[in-house]
Image: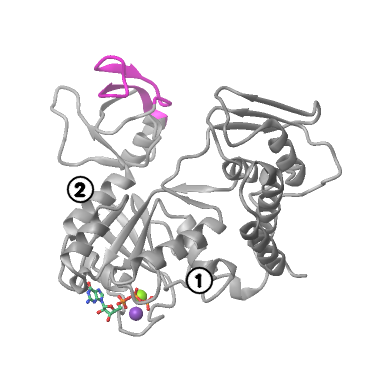
């Protein structure tokens, strides 16, 4: 049996199995198996078809946004509207066949927007160009899932399932579980909260099924079901078995996603109103240029970039020209942005803002910056 058949067998069995106390362990086992086969499926394939010609676009700018959606929902129309790049749009499906980058300029930031081919059900298993598209999606800071407002709900569920099956977690944060494989000592299991979905026994069962021996690169997972597994597990949150599996598989990406319903010119006001109220959703019409400003505002919020203002000694901060960085940037990152050699001449910096206890505070290169901090750098 090929991996695909095995996966589909397990999926069928999961669907068949009623979820209750008596089947909890059986289900946990099945899910661990499923995760294992999917990981195998995603191992970089040697065939050239999976390499993805025309998909390796250089990362540029301050952030990357990928457009994911079914064919003909308006992805290329959107790229051509928001950037100075023209991407061919047409009424037939699969107009776009490669990855086409454009740049959105917003609040002083350059946001790379990637137009991609439409994906369909089964994309994760290699249908169409699904695998390449999903591989690009994994590299993005935010995914825009573009949906046709006239048929959005079904498409949304299908796409979520595709992305889910390759380890992309949308609008979810990383489960708060400490997990550390050990050389010996068996499994030590602890939790700081009451667990309602997982138990020590279930965790052991899952671990025995899905064993991580050593992790070289992201997909190098090996399984030895007969050996005793050694690990330290600490639940700091009431997580589900699926979330626990995500932690042991370890290569999940947790990504903000905006669901963008396009073509609202084709539906009733009541329907527009209903879609607009769904979580993480924005309604637009590329055709009639409706609500695009609001979409940009939302996108900016989801990107959560850090803007830093610089200040020269004895002068006011320059609020017209921010340095834009990803979350988690340090003073050293700021230095590199200003000048390549600045970090080596760095003596100390003064920082005003939420990242410091008092303002200004004298800090070193490793100090972590926060959004809208002001910095003055003093050289040696
Ligand atoms: N009515 C309406 N039509 C739209 C809107 N936006 C795009 N379209 C039309 O939808 C069709 C498909 O647009 P594309 O931009 O090619 O869609 P795509 O998602 O890039 O399609 P593929 O590249 O084939 O996956 C075109 O005929 C567009 O003119 C909109 O807001 N309203
Ligand atoms: K199209
Ligand atoms: Mg297109």
- Label 2 to label 1, Cα distance in Å? 37 Å
On-image quarter of the N terminus: bottom right
Q: How many marks?
A: 2
On-image quarter of the C terminus: top left
From this view, report whether residue 305 is shown above or below residue 102: above
Q: Give ligand 3's quarter of the image.
A: bottom left
Q: Which residues are magenta?
A: 344-367
Does residue 256 appear left or right of residue 311 in this picture?
Answer: right
User: In this figure, which residue is indicated by the disc labeled 2?
Assistant: 107
Q: Nearer the viewer, residue 7 or 62?
A: 7
Task: Report the colour scheme.
Answer: one colour
- Mark 1 secondary-structure assignment: loop
Q: Position of residue 150 (x, y in %)?
A: 29, 72
- Whether ligand 1 has any atom under 8 Å from the Cβ at mark 2 is answered as no
Q: Quadrant of residue 367?
A: top left
* Extreme residue in the top direction: 358
User: In this figure, which residue is indicated by the disc labeled 1?
Assistant: 121
Q: Is residue 261 visible?
A: yes
Of tags 2 and 1, which is closer to the observer?
A: 1
Q: For residue 355: magenta?
A: yes
Instruction: State the residue at coordinates (51%, 48%).
Output: 253
Instruction: State the residue at coordinates (19%, 23%).
Output: 313
Q: Position of residue 266 (x, y in %)?
A: 21, 74
Q: Position of residue 119 (x, y in %)?
A: 46, 71
Instruction: State the residue at coordinates (72%, 49%).
Output: 221
């Amino acid at each position: 049996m090929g991996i695909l058949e095995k996966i589909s067998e397990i999926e069928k069995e999961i669907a068949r199995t009623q979820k209750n106390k008596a089947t909890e362990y059986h289900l946990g086992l099945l899910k661990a198996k499923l995760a294992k086969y999917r990981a195998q499926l995603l191992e970089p394939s040697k065939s050239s078809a999976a390499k993805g010609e025309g998909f390796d676009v250089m990362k540029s700018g301050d952030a990357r946004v990928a457009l994911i959606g079914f064919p003909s929902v308006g992805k290329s129309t959107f790229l051509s509207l928001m950037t100075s790049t023209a991407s061919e749009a047409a009424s037939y499906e699969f107009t776009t066949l490669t990855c086409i980058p454009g740049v959105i300029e917003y609040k002083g930031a350059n946001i790379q927007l990637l137009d991609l081919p439409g994906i369909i059900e089964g994309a994760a298993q290699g249908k169409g160009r699904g695998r390449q598209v999903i591989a690009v999606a994994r590299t993005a800071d935010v995914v825009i899932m573009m949906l046709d407002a006239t048929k959005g709900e079904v498409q949304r569920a299908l796409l979520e399932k595709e992305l889910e099956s390759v380890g992309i977690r949308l609008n979810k944060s990383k489960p708060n579980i400490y997990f550390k494989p050990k050389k010996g000592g068996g499994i030590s299991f602890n939790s700081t909260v009451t667990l309602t979905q997982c138990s020590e026994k279930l965790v052991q069962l899952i671990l025995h099924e899905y064993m991580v021996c050593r992790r070289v690169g992201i997909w190098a997972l090996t399984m030895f079901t007969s050996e005793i597994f050694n690990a330290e597990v600490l639940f700091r949150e009431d997580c589900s078995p699926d979330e626990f599996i995500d932690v042991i598989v370890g290569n999940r990406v947790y990504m903000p996603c905006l669901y963008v319903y396009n073509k609202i010119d084709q539906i009733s006001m009541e329907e527009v109103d209903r879609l607009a109220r769904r979580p993480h959703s924005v309604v637009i019409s590329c055709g009639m240029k409706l609500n695009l400003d609001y979409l940009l505002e939302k996108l900016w919020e989801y990107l959560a970039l850090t803007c830093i203002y610089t200040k020269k000694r004895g002068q006011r901060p320059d609020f017209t020209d921010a340095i834009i960085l990803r979350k988690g940037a340090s003073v050293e990152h700021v230095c590199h942005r200003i000048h390549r050699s600045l970090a080596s001449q760095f003596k100390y910096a003064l920082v005003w803002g939420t990242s410091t206890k008092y303002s200004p505070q004298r800090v070193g290169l490793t100090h972590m910056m926060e959004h809208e901090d002001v910095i003055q750098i003093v050289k040696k």
